[in-house]
Image (cartoon, rainbow, N blue to C red):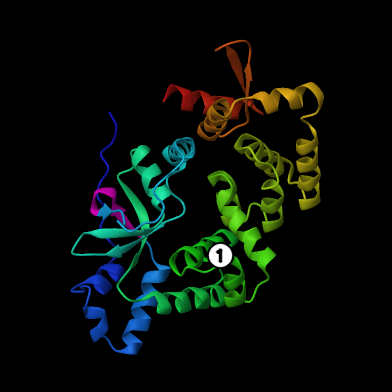
């Protein structure tokens, strides 16, 4: 029988900041108090129940790709939500979504009960931008944390890549390289956060498109302690591999079957190949490097 998910309370620091705060109370605070409150909230996350969050009725984006949502939901079932959403406090325990609706919807599909979230209060956008930029410049953040902060500045402060690069004192290509990290599988992001691989390794792995190949590259990098140049050479080999007949087969694989292949690769955390053999027939191959990895895959399948 599955364990019941216990509802987590907000951290003491965040709870104290939000106590007795309503939509107009921020205006009564002194400038110094406002700055400190926004700094604290911009750097802290809280676990919030999905049932306490409502979507923004003025959200301009209303169409979400169903296949992409299902792929993300499959990943969340295994890894949970790594990149927090952002909400605005509306009342005692009610919040309105500001950014991250795709992550929010996928979390519901995955059956999650609560998700990590940054909490914002009314009329704090200018101070939020200042706090996030200051956080990047002062704190010893890992590359994934920097990428998440860049994404927050783009989403919550409506900045273009060029404007963001100017704010943080970086060139546009550097900002883009950081943002690409957020498209990598959770396993690659975790390895980067734990310093098992470097930013150079992650950038090289991002050079291949499908999740199963990215996970395979990560495993080979960790197992053989590969240098960045060695990983780049592997990526080049991966890119050149689909030639002739194999290239044609991969090109003809329908998008829905590609989604299935990628979803299996994410769930099993290994490389998965899928081939079609006639109408509605085919096979998929699950790769493993050793007995321990095979046993882990079998455990996932049994669950």
Regarding residue 194, the answer to whether it shows in the image is: no
Question: Where residue 167 sits: x, y (%)?
Answer: 57, 76
Magenta region: which residues?
46-52
Q: Give the labeled residue for mark 1.
A: 146
Q: How would you rate the neighbour count of disc 1 (Cα within 10 Å): few for under 14, some for 14-19, many for 20 or more?
A: many
Above/below status of 16 relative to 250? below
Give the side of residue 273 with respect to residue 246, left or right.
left
**In which quadrant of the rendered image does the N terminus lie?**
top left
Q: Which secondary structure lies at badge 1?
A: helix
Residue at image point 62% right, 10% down? 278
**In which quadrant of the rendered image does the C terminus lie?**
top left
Front one among 123 and 110: 123
Residue at image point 27% right, 42% down? 5
Give the side of residue 21 with respect to residue 14, left or right.
left
Front one among 224 and 138: 138
Residue at image point 37% right, 55% down? 116
Q: Is residue 48 magenta?
A: yes
Quadrant of the image occupied by residue 212:
top right
Q: Is residue 181 magenta?
A: no
Residue at image point 44% right, 40% down? 69
Q: How many marks?
A: 1
Above/below status of 120 relative to 293? below
């Amino acid at each position: 029988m599955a364990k019941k998910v216990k509802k987590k309370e907000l951290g003491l620091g965040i709870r104290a900041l939000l106590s007795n705060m309503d939509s107009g109370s921020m205006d009564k605070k002194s400038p110094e108090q406002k700055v400190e409150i926004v700094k604290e909230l911009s750097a802290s996350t809280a676990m919030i129940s999905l049932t306490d969050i409502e979507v923004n009725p003025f959200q301009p984006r209303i169409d979400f790709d169903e296949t992409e949502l299902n792929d993300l939901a499959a990943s969340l079932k295994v890894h949970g939500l790594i990149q927090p959403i952002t909400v605005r406090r509306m009342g005692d325990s009610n919040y309105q979504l500001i950014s991250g609706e795709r992550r929010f919807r996928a979390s519901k599909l995955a059956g999650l009960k609560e998700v990590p979230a940054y909490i914002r209060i009314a009329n704090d956008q200018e101070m939020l931008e200042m706090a996030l930029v200051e956080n990047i410049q002062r704190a010893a953040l890992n590359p994934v944390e920097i990428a998440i902060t860049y994404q927050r500045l783009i989403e919550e402060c409506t900045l273009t890549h060029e404007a963001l690069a100017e704010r943080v004192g970086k060139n546009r290509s550097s900002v883009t390289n950081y943002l690409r990290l957020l498209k990598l599988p959770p396993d690659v992001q975790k390895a980067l956060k734990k310093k098992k691989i470097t930013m150079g390794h992650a950038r090289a792995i991002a050079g291949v498109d499908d999740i199963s190949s990215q996970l395979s590259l990560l495993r080979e990098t960790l197992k053989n302690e590969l240098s960045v140049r060695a990983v780049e050479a592997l990526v080049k080999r991966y890119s050149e591999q689909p030639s002739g007949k194999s290239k044609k087969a991969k090109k003809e694989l329908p998008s829905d079957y590609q989604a299935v292949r990628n979803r299996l690769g994410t769930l099993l955390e290994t490389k998965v190949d899928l081939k079609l053999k006639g109408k509605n027939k085919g096979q998929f191959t699950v790769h493993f490097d050793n007995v321990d990895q095979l046993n882990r895959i079998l455990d996932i399948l049994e669950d």
